Image: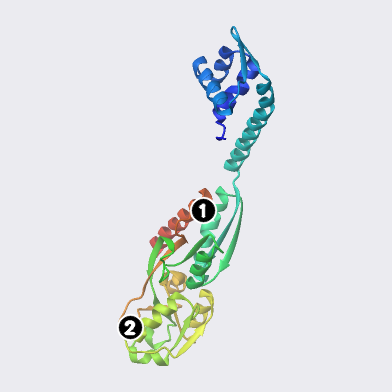
Amino acid sequence: MDILDTRQLTAFVVLARRGSFTQAGKELHITQSAISHAIKALESNLGCQLFLRQGKSVFLTHHGRELLPLAENIMQQMAQARLALGALDRNPRGKLTIGCTPAASQFILPTVFREFKESFPLYDIKVVPGETPETARRLVAGEIDIGICLKPSDASKLECHPIFTDELEMLVSPMHPWATGKPRLKDAGKETFIVSSRNSQSFTMLNEMFLKQGARLNHIIELGSTEAMKELAKLGIGIAVSARWTAQAEIKQKQLHVVPLPRGQVKRTWVTAILKGKRLNLAERTFVGLCEETGRLMTKKD
């Protein structure tokens, strides 16, 4: 049997209550003819007569009396659904699982969360930390909803929305020789480089750049925290590799100096990533948009 048309059911219920095509048409703000067509279509679909017509009045048949409580129940459930959805529109509820890199969690998420919570105060948000390769894997596996990371080297299964582009540079203590002198590529192997993680995409890009120039990075410190990286660099323990926007205050106060990478640039694109083909709901679209807006503001500050 075909699915019942809710407009036809509505016409049936109103006509059964009113007992008149004229009154039913007035209540539904449609013509008597439209009511009549709806009832005929419903009777044809069900294969039975629902009303007996006597002059201008109508009366339910046995089949009509059987259908009425069922139809009223359907109408009631539809009304409840509308109320529930209306409440969701006013106070949306849901869960959002975000995967992000350590730098994104420190510099991007706080601003985004503050704005997001104003529009979706009842949403539960879970943050799953991880470097870009791990975040991309979790997206493909369906473990997270949105990733904030660098554009993955393999994004074939993902849809990436750019946030901003930056460049990796070296942050050194004012006492480091490279703070005043031009860094020499041949000295790179003797230096200690401070990075977030060897598993990060930033380290992979940095290491590949040096290897192409014939230099090998022999001394690496992994910290997983941008703040810790900067502190060690300020103490002269090593060279922190990051983007200058992560150390604006330290650079302004001359606690750290920015040194370009020798003989090459390593540019990165930060993105919000989702699984390709995924349809975003309103909350998810809002979150992605806020990430993009935060990126624009960060770029202006930089």
Residue toward you, 13 or 111 = 13
Instruction: Classify 162 as above or below 50.
Output: below
User: What number is the disc on residue 262?
Assistant: 2
Disc 1, SS: helix
Quick one: label 1, few (<14), some, or many (20+) residues within 10 Å? some
Q: What residue lies at 59% left-to-right and 38% top-to-bottom?
A: 86
First of labels 1, 2 by sequence position: 2
Between 51 and 275, which is closer to the camera in this rendering? 51
User: Which amino acid does the dot numbered 2 rest on?
Assistant: Pro
Question: Would you call the spot at circle 2 few (<14 residues within 10 Å), some (14-19), or many (20 or more)?
Answer: some
Q: Residue farthest to the front?
A: 47
Q: Look at the picture and state if 296 lies above or below 239.
A: above
Residue 178 shows in the view: yes
Residue at 64% across / 32% down in the picture?
74
Amino acid at dot 1: Glu
Indicate the quadrant where residue 173 lies.
bottom left
Image point (66%, 23%), residue name? 63
The CA span between labels 1 and 2 is 40 Å
Give me the disc on residue 23. none
* Front label number (1 vs 2): 1
